[in-house]
Image (tube, helix red, strand yellow):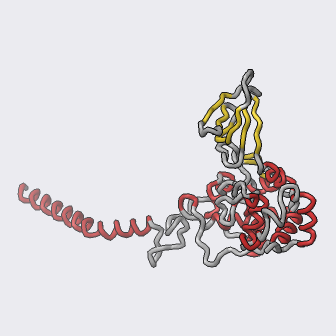
Amino acid sequence: MQMRQGLIAAAVAALAWTTVAAAIQDAPARQAGAAQQGRGAGPQGGGPGRQGGGGRPNFPQQQRPPGDPAVIARGRALFGVHCTACHGADLRGGDQGGPNLLRSQIILTDQKGENIVPVIRDGRQGAVGTMPAFHLPENDVVAIAEYIHSVMGQAGRQGRPPERQTPLEINVLVGDAAAGQRYFERVCSRCHSPGGDLRAVAARVADPRALQDLWVSGGLSGRGGRGGGGRGDADGNRVHVTVTAPGSAPITGRLVRIDDFVVSLVDDDGVRRTFRREGAVPKVELNDPLEPHRRLVLELADQDMHNVTAYLATLK
């Protein structure tokens, strides 16, 4: 009886050892396969992972079916005309201080334009300024949204834009130069002159898109290169402020910061001074030479913008 039990125990031990040995031999293969799968690799070590080299798509734009190529192409052209000045050709922000769309929660959570379309159509008051409403046909607004989705669908990690095989080229010289000259003389000649600050401007700024962005934002005035945006941290080289406290003489200097609670400036002696604000006290007067350009953005018609750009492109 004891001999029989000993034989059974020996058989069980041998079977267990065989199972353990097989598991040890298979472990490296299983680990390698799991690692390869975790990197999103296919048979050649990399499926079409969109997160910088192979991760599974985790944004809604990377999970949705691709849009109609014709609609995306139209949206790309419309985005170049209406949106690049604020948001940049790569969606990461442009010369007028618009936000990075690659990290926008509005974009990241949108599926079929339910978030994007109302913002384009109705405008938006954001943390960095006011986005005007664009009165475009519904199909054009949808096309812009589809183009944004197509870019987001190929975005890399940490909001990096997708790498393009060919540079994005957009022709903005589509206006009437003569009409642009008339508009310039009526609206812009109060501060600018083609024989003065804008002399040979097209030779200095050869790229028509950069030329358009700069004149709309006020960068061609020589008093700053980026327009738009808020004044939380102001560009002291172009914005001046006068603060008058009750019973005190006015103090003027370069604006450093202004919000609902404090205003900070650097006076002529280079001393930084900060004043606490309580409603309208102290009296604060801003002198921002780019303020006319900020107002202009809200009322500038597309045709006038292209006409002025075409006119400025002739100043060589």
Q: Name which quarter of the figure residue 206 lies in.
A: bottom right
- Residue occupying image coordinates x 74% and y 22%: 246
Name the one closer to the observer, 65 or 91: 91
Q: Is residue 122 left or right of residue 14?
A: right
Q: Name which quarter of the figure residue 276 lies in.
A: top right
- Residue occupying image coordinates x 83% and y 66%: 195
Name the one closer to the observer, 297 or 74: 297
- The total number of labels drawn is 0
Residue 262: tell me if it is visible: yes
Residue 168 at x, y percent in the picture: 68, 74
- Residue occupying image coordinates x 58% and y 71%: 163
The C terminus is located in which quarter? bottom right
- Residue occupying image coordinates x 23% and y 63%: 20
Name the one closer to the observer, 222 or 150: 222
Q: Name which quarter of the figure residue 79 lies in.
A: bottom right
Name the one closer to the observer, 274 or 43: 274
Residue 78: tell me if it is visible: no
Determine the residue located farthest toward the front in the rendered image: 269
Placement of 201 over or under 283, stated as above or below: below
The N terminus is located in which quarter? bottom left
